[in-house]
Image (cartoon, grey):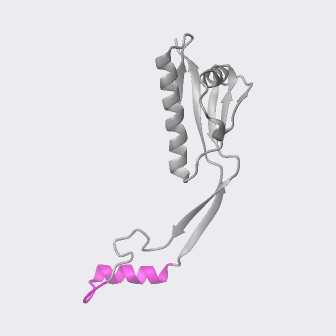
Amino acid sequence: MQFQVPINKDKTFEINFFNLLAESLQTLAIENNKWPDKLTFIGPLGKELYDIHIKNDWDLSKFNPIHLQSAASKIRIEYKEPITIKQERGALKGDTLHDKIINGIPGPETVSKIINYAATPQYTIEKQERPYLEIHLKRAT
């Protein structure tokens, strides 16, 4: 994702920036069922946007906003600690037969699904990830 930062910033820009920031935080929260807790403004353009958040007294303390010096300008939204992601694996999970009761004599397609289900093991994949979202900043011309 890329965001244009003009030299002269008016209230409309600040509102658009706040909306982008709020939308990005919410997107990551919805995808991972947890609010991110680290917001990093990086580079010279990141510093300009960090200063806007300070000037407007936006309460982003929950996300621990900081500024880092760098040649690249971006905003990085992430989690301090890895998140455990679980994936259920199995034959009928999400299939049309999952949690269904079959009345009568099943047809050949249904019988095939039942046999495949019985032959396929059920298991859960659990992994640690640290999801993040980056907004690359570019000077508007």
On the image, the x and y values in percent for residue 55 come to 62, 20
Residue at 67% across, 22% down: 47
| Quadrant of the rendered image containing residue 45 | top right
Residue at 66% across, 46% down: 79
Magenta-highlighted residues: 102-120
Residue at 40% across, 68% down: 94
Taking 111 as reference, is 133 left or right?
right
Q: Is residue 62 above or below residue 97?
A: above
On the image, the x and y values in percent for residue 31 come to 52, 50
- Magenta stretch holds residue 116: yes
Residue at 38% across, 70% down: 95
Q: Is residue 82 above or below residue 74?
A: below
Front residue of 135 and 79: 79
Q: Is residue 25 above or below residue 101?
A: above
Front residue of 61 and 92: 61
Majority SS type along the magenta span:
helix
On the image, the x and y values in percent for residue 80 come to 70, 46
